Amino acid sequence: MTVKIYGSGGSGTVALPSSKSFTQRYILGSAFLNKNVTLNYVTITGDDSIAMDIAQKAGASITVSDSSFRIRPSLRCPEEIYVGESATSYRIAVGLLGSAGCITHVTGDPSLARRPMEPLIKALEANDVHLTLNSEGFYDVNGTESKKRYVEVDGVSSQFVSSMIFYYAKKGGGEFLVKNMRSPGYVYITKRVLYDLGYFVNIEKTITINPSGVWKTAIDVEPDYSSLAFFLVLGLLSENVDIRFNIKRMSRIQPDSVLLDMFKDNIAIDRDTVRVLPGIKDRVTVDADRNPDLCPPLSVIGIFSDYGVEIDNYARLRTKESNRYEGMVDMASRFGAIVEDNGKDLFIKRGELKNPGTLSYSDHRMIMSAAIAAAVSGLEITVDNETKVSKSFPGFFKELSRFANISESN
């Protein structure tokens, strides 16, 4: 499916999806740690569906009702799981399967098989979890001899650290050493989830996990800041739109909540409502190590701003769902922006605006970024692969249609 976008205008409150970083962790934690929970205010994204399928294969009963669903676990080791494109579900599930003593065949989308796993594999194998790379590029798990040892994990991905936290939680507690931890905010999401599921997690150089014996049976899942970023950018760059968000259930645990600090001069807050005020008056700087998911939407600001955008430590973006570094450079260049690269950081600022014609990306965040750039430009632009945004924001184009002219075609 493709969409044609031409011009922007309108006002309203954007309905944001729930944070899939939280939801996937709650689903898998509930299923493998045997915690009955009801999750409220949930938008079922593509990645959430993957986590739900894994949980159900592991014996959980999941009942969906409107924006809530109830999880009733009855753990059994699945013979096979499918992890799709979800790195979060894949990495956390491998840790939980190993800790639970399961023997499980793992399959998924080929694009996910290309993403790194070695630091997690090394830490799990140090606990006598046997992992075998299969013909599809995924690691089959044999946890029948798994132990609870003090091991070291390289924190180059927060998901490796989170997987090991879940591993020790399933073992009834434990501790391990982390070196080189990046994106610590996502580890704090794991800490929050496990607190809600009945575990204390102490995060220092050594991470310690202990059961508390008390957990929540009803949990409100907060909306997603990385999804908010797309419409925030539209509101910042467009004088003819008036965009609001309801953030009643939001905490500042999500790393991408840094948006509220970065753009504090462009945000008006009235109790639970956040209103976006247009106008960029300074260069925007974002660290790809800490906030990789913010880089695609914020790169759009560079295309239309004389002050530009600086994306530091962009190497992290080469190993996300796609090579987002290449995607951002391609998109900015095709709109006529000036792009500079010093080998570590990327700089984008406005050049002579061009019509890129058709923008075609496979990565959900690049597709949404392209759509926002198209709406801001005022040009008639086609964006391919509309349906792929369901991975994180199923209602994205429905929400965008309130602020831009959109038509669909096959």
Image: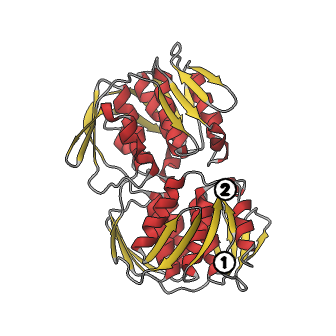
Q: x, y (%) of residue 286?
A: 51, 36
Determine if residue 90 is in view: no
Nearer to us in this view, 67 or 24: 24
The answer to whether residue 120 is above or below residue 387 is below
Q: Which of the numbered marks, if any, corresponds to residue 112?
A: 2
Nearer to us in this view, 310 or 106: 310
Q: CA distance from mark 2 to mark 1?
A: 20 Å
Q: Is residue 284 left or right of residue 177?
A: left
Q: x, y (%) of residue 63?
A: 39, 76
What residue sits right under mark 1 in the picture?
98
Residue in the picture at 67% in, 47% down: 319
Residue in the picture at 62% in, 37% down: 314
Q: Is residue 213 left or right of residue 245?
A: right
The answer to whether residue 204 is above or below residue 380 is below
In terms of sequence position, does the residue under pointer 2 or pointer 1 come before the other?
1
Q: Tag 2's secondary structure? A: helix
